[in-house]
Image: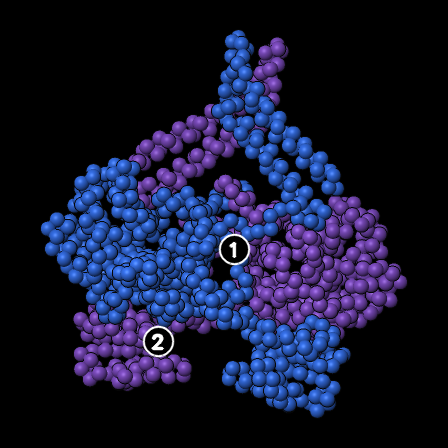
Chain colours: A purple, B blue
Amino acid sequence: MTSDRWRCKLSNAFGGLLRVCVEQESSRIPVRSTTADKAQGEIVRKLKEAKASKDQIGEEMAKLLDLKTQLGTDDGKQMFALKTPKGTRDYNPKQMAIRESVFNIITSCFKRHGAETIDTPVFELKETLTGKYGEDSKLIYDLKDQGGELLSLRYDLTVPFARYLAMNKISNIKRYHIAKVYRRDNPAMTKGRYREFYQCDFDIAGQYDPMIPDAECIKVVHEILAELQLGDFRIKVNDRRILDGMFAVCGVPDDKFRAICSTVDKLDKASWEEVKNEMVGEKGLAPEAADRIGEYVRMHGGFDLAEKLLQDPQLSQNKHALEGLTDMKDLFKYLALFKITDKVIFDLSLARGLDYYTGVIYEAVLIQPQNVHPSEELVSVGSVAGGGRYDGLVGMFDPKGRKVPCVGVSVGIERVFSILEQKAEASEKKIRTTETQVLVASAQKNLLEERLKLTSELWDAGIKAEVLYKKNPKLLSQLQHCEETGIPLVAIIGEQELKEGVVKLRNVATREEVDVSRITLVEEIKKRSIQS
Amino acid sequence: MTSDRWRCKLSNAFGGLLRVCVEQESSRIPVRSTTADKAQGEIVRKLKEAKASKDQIGEEMAKLLDLKTQLGTDDGKQMFALKTPKGTRDYNPKQMAIRESVFNIITSCFKRHGAETIDTPVFELKETLTGKYGEDSKLIYDLKDQGGELLSLRYDLTVPFARYLAMNKISNIKRYHIAKVYRRDNPAMTKGRYREFYQCDFDIAGQYDPMIPDAECIKVVHEILAELQLGDFRIKVNDRRILDGMFAVCGVPDDKFRAICSTVDKLDKASWEEVKNEMVGEKGLAPEAADRIGEYVRMHGGFDLAEKLLQDPQLSQNKHALEGLTDMKDLFKYLALFKITDKVIFDLSLARGLDYYTGVIYEAVLIQPQNVHPSEELVSVGSVAGGGRYDGLVGMFDPKGRKVPCVGVSVGIERVFSILEQKAEASEKKIRTTETQVLVASAQKNLLEERLKLTSELWDAGIKAEVLYKKNPKLLSQLQHCEETGIPLVAIIGEQELKEGVVKLRNVATREEVDVSRITLVEEIKKRSIQS
């Protein structure tokens, strides 16, 4: 089909769209009130009810878009945006090299703690995700209904994990899962906030003695953040049961717990005044109750704070708070054995947004000394990990409501990538994106076949080798390729070397050259690769 | 909201659906022909045109589904299917262990050949994928339009790669990309055919001397299949230019080339008779032309066949065929240098479905001796890799139509997984799913804190260590955990050991126990881990 014919179709489709709009207008003209007119009015009403016009506009718009797309590729030239979808990005080889090093650190830590790994599909049945994320459900990506199941892209790795446990009737497992998740949030890509991003999850499922797996999760976060060398950090901890107890003694009605909890969660970004206003104004809480909450959420400390709050005459009377505070003491006892209490803060303002938490919750933030301010106060530069205990989630999937207690942590590494990328750029240290050990080269013409033969021998011996795809490349351009990509060695062959059964092995950095027998070449390359 | 209220809503929604159906029926009753009636008729017609009723039914159905879902999670019990979406699966830890070993082999090979890696988003703008896959476009998963861009899940890794090259104005790169792709095909999961599956792609982009990168891609496939030890295999090669030349000399009209090519592609699954019927019946080709094609597609060989076809008086007169055959000779020359011609067949029946190929094409199949048949004929058990040259694809994305010649291969590993999984099950060899080196245990009570302390010391020293999350676990259950998960060592502490500053290090397999000083414990564990 020619471009002209497409343009004609496009114009017809525009006409269709206009016609629908006109028809929509004309249906608003008042009609005389006879029986027939009434019937007509009734139908018009139904027509409106069914939002038929609106749907039709949608249909015509879709046709237009389709035609535009087809027109775009018709004559070989693209007429559409050459970009990745909003909030997503490609990773180039340098970024991948950084990503791989981060994943290696994280995976090693998870394996050091004895975790297995699983994988789940990128999409789930829509109903699997329904009712798990509270207000954030609106951020879920749905797939188009193309006849079949209603599907959504996974929003996190926790809900698919719970579905997996229920489906396979697994009652204990320690697993990690590193994969991309999807949220239709407002992206802020300079801050490392994307719509497609990685989560690195470590979870322990099973019925165990209190706070031991919980403490290990915090230890895991500590190990990862220490090893990534991103600067100083703190891990804030709290407990949903302590929050609930606190809300109860402050006079928050039971049915407002979750709503008030969501508001408290905003304290890391908003001031207490703003948070209080939302509690009283939007959520309808009594100002006195809000003020009492305000006193609690200012508190932070460690083991001592848990002890002190256990002396609080009201809080200690609340069953949930009592349990939470007693467990918090145990948690800090274990964290002391792990020698990490200096980075962990029991912080009563930590709430976390997700609905499914039932016990301890935690969040790790990177901090840096605020140079601007003379007081050297520590400033958070953002959350990089979070998690907690969710004892009820698996039961939501199990046909018999059988519960599997779980605790876990999710490391969000996009922000970590952003920081490491900036570091890498600032340092000007060259990042290699390949691992090639040797380039097979020649200075003379007509040696392509000999070069290919030698390269193939090296591949078969497990050597990482490259060869330029030219019949007669210049030696200079072969050496340049090594300089650019960081290949440390060149194996040079010429008529003379072939006759003598040797290869000239050149060190790119030192420009040193030695003749190596072809029989020992592989061994020599291996030896030099270990040294470098 | 209570369950009862949801049930009430559900019943109302059912009512809505019924009402729409009734209204649809009643609109078919003939009306008297007055002016008003005519107007009514007109509106009814429009109503039908707009498919309003159908849309309304759709809406009511959606409401029902929503209510069903909400009802399902309302009282904590799930009323929905506990499953993964059609054509997808979870990977359990054992499957992940196999997957990791396969990926290691493939990644090592790609790196041995000097490839970098990139990553792209799981979805692309819908228009990026439009017009690239011919008939298969219907298998693309679209995302729901939730206000924003029209998005589709990637169908392969080749088109996103071409988009990446054009977007970043890259004119040469050797890259690999291992990631999941999505096709709404009929799944055959026992045969390893899924809707979500991995592709492992290796591509070389850039203007080079003919057939050198092409030969390397075939070498890569050969190395991977040999190393995976899946049994014997063959790599079939052909060239789109040879196919086009062949179609021309057989009398296929120019505009039927792609359609006839798609039909030829079915020859690996269908008989010649069936394929001929499709050519003549469905595609309207003259029977004589089909017969002439039939003679060509029976041919297979190597370098010699290319030479022989260059003597074919008609084929050699065709410009495309001449180019393709000349290049095919070079290809076999390079493959001979790589010593892999015994596995490579020049097969004129190989066509490959995708539109974007412009030169050499290839496909690797696993074969096994057919025991049933006395002739020991080789039987294909399916394609595991495929690829070819696509010199026009990047130009479709480039605003100036600038071309970047590309050649690549995609290894489809789901079938490989299936085979290796079956092998693993048959062998009864135990696959470890963790790498834990040592379990920290105790035989006595009240030593939880000492166990945690020692475990933490081991973690900090880089030892992969586990500890049971029980206050007072039995020694037997600690040893059992090692047996079940394959942990080779146990570090046992008791009052006596603590007093003496030692740890009892037990070899799980031999039951041998030695006292090791706590100072040298890390070293001892490392030494024993290398041995095992």
- Residue at figure coordinates x 24%, y 73% from the top left: A453
Find disc 1 in the rendering and name its residue.
B89
Tell whether B47 sits left or right of A458: right
Q: Does B105 appear above or below B289?
A: below
What x and y, as percent, mark residue B278? 29, 40
Query: Quarter of the image holding residue B274?
Result: top left
Residue toward you, A449 or A384: A449
Is any atom of residue B412 visible in this view?
A: yes
Which residue is the extreme one toward the right? A313
Q: Residue flagged by tag 1: what amino acid is it?
A: Arg
Query: Quarter of the image holding residue B499?
Result: bottom right
- Residue at figure coordinates x 61%, y 39% from the top left: B65
- Residue at figure coordinates x 31%, y 75% from the top left: A458
Kindly indicate whether the residues beneath marks 1 and 2 are on one polypeptide chain. Answer: no
Find disc 2 in the rendering and name its residue.
A463
Marked residue chain, label 2 = A
What x and y, as percent, mark residue B83? 57, 51
Q: Does A351 appear above or below B23?
A: below
Is any atom of residue B245 visible in this view?
A: no
What x and y, as percent, mark residue A217? 65, 68
10 Å crowding of disc 2: few (<14), some (14-19), many (20+): many
Under circle 1, the secondary element is loop
Quadrant position of the N terminus of chain B in the picture = top right
Query: Quarter of the image holding residue A32?
Result: top right
